[in-house]
Amino acid sequence: MLKIGLTGGIGAGKSTVSEILAAHGAVIIDADKIAREVVAPGEPLLEELAERFGEDVIADGGGLDRAQLAAAAFVDEESTLALNALMHPAIRDRTLEHFARHSDAEVVVHDVPLLVENAMTPAYHLNLLVDVPSDLRLQRLMSARGMDRADAESRIARQADDEDRYAVCDVIIDNAGSVSQTQARVARLVDDRLLPFAANLEAQRRAARGPVELVDATDHDWPMQAQRIIAKLHHGIGTQFRIDHIGSTAVPGLAAKDVIDLQLLVPDLDTARALSATLADLGYPGDDAVDNLGEGQFESKRFHANTDPGRAVNLHVRTEDSVGAVFAREFVELMRTDSAERERYALVKRTLADDHARDAHTAGYADAKEPYFLTMRRRLVPASFD
């Protein structure tokens, strides 16, 4: 199952995108509907709310009187915390029931208005943000929903700002134009990324990659993307393992292949293998591999890579004290601090990328860089050659 988080600021048209995704076969789990489900007549949560906040929170028809609940629950911080302590577990458990019910679905979209505000994004393979400028959202709230300006501005201000959303969402869906334009954008997203991602995930198959192409770092937000991926990995495997952004995309200003390299450190390779199934479920299937240390020396590791066709990732799982792990950290630090060596490496990369531009894959380019890396290993990890 490909799990997707869907969000957007009030007035952005998230419901429109949700409907389009549903029309393309995605299962939609609506957080707002679940919040209403758990307080429907006969639900046990209603009785718990009545016990804590008084019988007046139950309406004549047996459902929840939201105005009465708000009056009772938002009078002080203690009451608000009590409300959250009752509501959040009930919503969480009901949400898990919905996911379990659709466990055989290809794509499941969790539609959550406060996905970013509640720091939920690491729990999903991808997070989609329906994006509309705040001034246009303000106009829509006033015209389509009849809100006065002060109320609309207040509601927008209470939510996460655009910068916070961009930092944690993987895909931005522009919904500032017509519905037909949005339908076309979502259709392309489904066909080009979501369905191939779901198929690769099910088959535990890495996404295909093209030939070597170096791109300008200024056109990409690689460090931000790396942090999103690391957050998802930590959510899946725990925070006890160190994960670092390594490689050229971790060096500001350095041209690179559009591939994010990460290094996951484990105490031993048995631990690495034990994590393999979880990493595959997170979208990174892997195998046993080796680091070429040069001069006929090799060091064992695990190598995992992306199933998402829209974001190439190399995940190197190395033991904490391995030569490869130490070299990866030291090399990035060297590239960040030594401008002369950074320029030299950039020239090496550009020359070899041109030499291997016609290759069907990147293996030849990677092998051609090994003599340079051998020189750097002698400089950065000399003890490994003793």
Image (cartoon, rainbow, N blue to C red):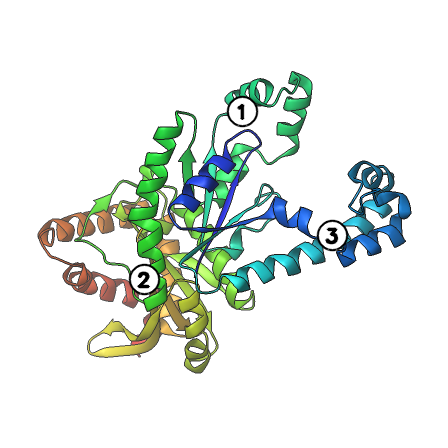
Q: Position of residue 255 (x, y in %)?
A: 27, 45
- Residue at (30% x, 47% y) in the render: 191
Q: Quadrant of the C terminus?
A: bottom left
For the residue carrying disc 3, how many other residues have a C-alpha within 10 Å: few (<14), some (14-19), or many (20+)? Answer: some
Mark 2: secondary structure = helix
Q: Is residue 243 above or below residue 22?
A: below
Q: Type of residue at label 3?
A: Met
- Outermost residue on the front side: it is 61
Circle 1 is placed at which residue position? 137
Q: Is residue 342 above or below residue 305?
A: above
Q: Position of residue 59 (x, y in %)?
A: 83, 42
Could you say which disc has been placed on residue 87 in the image?
Answer: 3
Earlier-in-chain disc, 1 versus 3: 3
- Residue at (19% x, 53% y) in the render: 210
In front: 10, or 226? 10
The Cα–Cα distance between marks 2 and 1, rounded to whole angstroms, is: 36 Å
Q: Position of residue 328 (x, y in %)?
A: 36, 63
Earlier-in-chain disc, 2 versus 3: 3
For the residue carrying disc 1, how many other residues have a C-alpha within 10 Å: few (<14), some (14-19), or many (20+)? Answer: many
Earlier-in-chain disc, 2 versus 1: 1
Circle 2 is placed at which residue position? 200
